[in-house]
Amino acid sequence: MFDALTQKFNNVFKSLSGRGRITEANVSDAVRDVRKALLEADVSYNVAKQFCKDVTQAAMGADVIKSLHPSQVFVKIVNDQLTKLMGPVDTNIYYVSPGPTVVMLAGLQGGGKTTTAAKLAKYTVAKGKKPLLVADDLQRPAAIEQLVTLGEQLGIEVYSETSKNAVKVAKNALKHAQKNGFDVVVIDTAGRLHIDEEMMTEVANIAKAVTPHQIYLVCDSMTGQDAVNSAKEFNERLELDGVILTKLDGDARGGAALSVKAVTGKPIKFVGVGEKLDKLEEFHPDRMASRILGMGDVVTLVEKAQEQFDAEEAQKLQAKMAKGSFGFDDFLKQMQAVKNMGGMKSMLKLMPGASQLGDLDLDGNEIGQMEAIVYSMTRKERQNPDLIDSPRRRRIAAGSGTQPHNVSSLVKTFMRSRDMLKSLSGGKLGGLKALMSGGLNIGALSQQMAQGRKIKQRSKRKRVIKRRGKIKKRR
């Protein structure tokens, strides 16, 4: 997400980093580039204009002009303004007592309301609640069947009727929830391909009939400015409590995320970052601003790690690293945990400086190849990689469908990484290292293997060019 915007911001910051001092002219040029980047990212013109005005006012202060590191101060100003633009933080679903808490989802067709309803219900389960999903999209074919299927996958009850009266279905669902002790009711409503009076009347009538405690607008972030325009119209007809942005993992522009809060005045509650039902994240403006500027999101990284890495297991792993006995079996465990965190590529994007890594295929062939190689080793070889000599490398390569040099590259980089982690284990690196040591190890291996291939390819090209030169010289 935000790949193009991140790159443009990095270019702006690089242009300032080479200057000893920043003048008003420098700031003006930088802000002009920032405005262009925002507009290309499909940010609302008025939002981009006001954002640049705020950045300019802050950047023209003495703190920037007189700073020894003006580019760093400028980065902080942009970061603060981005956080302010998307904030404040408001990820709470305000549960009522006695329940149930009624949450209604509205939005255009194709924005991902039905899937988001299931994701939101799963989220409430993790918070200790008992949710009821309500299939109240009576317009889109198979919408009810889709929600029922998603409910079955999650083990969450779905209320549905054959009635064509959306208001009646919502009222009956609420009675069912009250009677059967549900804590939360999530209502999936119908949408249209565009704003029309019939749709707006229907959602307004449902809201009037069941008086939901929270109304969330579901916006497809890939539609960019259109999502912002529809959000504005919905907000004028409904008393929205927040926005959920979907498909943010596939949006290279990100204009909706930067515009929708400023246009509607309503907080972004959650963001959908994948198709799977666990890919719904709480929205934190400060973390998102950090990601946009290519500075990673360490807090989210740690939170994801804490969900996957058992504390006791991490301590055992740290002890193994301190002794230098970290083996490929441990590597496989950490690899699986990293997959559960969303894959190496998504995890690396949360690390500071990840935008400088380039486009490595860390979710596909890279990880698959490493797994195949490790699974082709014997137990003793996995425990003690020093045993892997030339004959063993050929056998492992044959078993994994790779080449001996692939095996050699993995073993060498693994052992270098293991030695490095052993030396680091002696220091006090804090909770992140203890939690993420395995994941970081895999990241180092992936990058080193990819870099190794690039070096070999460059060397091969140089040999070919040199050989062609000799042949031409003979002629």
Image (cartoon, rainbow, N blue to C red):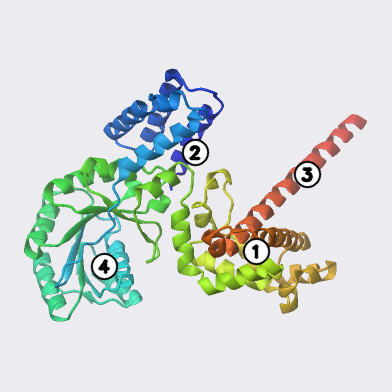
Residue 361 x/y as whole percent:
58, 54
Label of residue 369 in the image: 1
Residue 186 x/y as whole percent:
22, 67
1 or 4: tag closer to the N-terminus: 4
Tell me which amino acid carries mark 2: Gln
Q: CA distance from mark 2 to mark 1?
A: 30 Å
Label of residue 459 in the image: 3
Q: CA distance from mark 4 to mark 3?
A: 56 Å
Q: CA distance from mark 4 to mark 2?
A: 41 Å
**Residue tagged 2:** 7
Q: Quadrant of residue 307?
A: bottom left
Residue 358 x/y as whole percent:
58, 45
* Residue 374 in view, yes or no: yes
Label of residue 142 in the image: 4
2 or 1: tag closer to the N-terminus: 2
Q: CA distance from mark 3 to mark 2?
A: 29 Å
Q: For the image shown, how many numbered marks are present on the structure?
A: 4
Q: Quadrant of residue 178?
A: bottom left
Crowding near the residue tagged with mark 4, few <14, some 14–19, many ≥20 C-alpha atoms within 10 Å:
few
User: What secondary structure is found at the residue carrying circle 3?
Assistant: helix
3 or 2: tag closer to the N-terminus: 2
* Residue 30 in view, yes or no: no
Residue 418 x/y as whole percent:
69, 62
Q: 207 above or below 475?
A: below
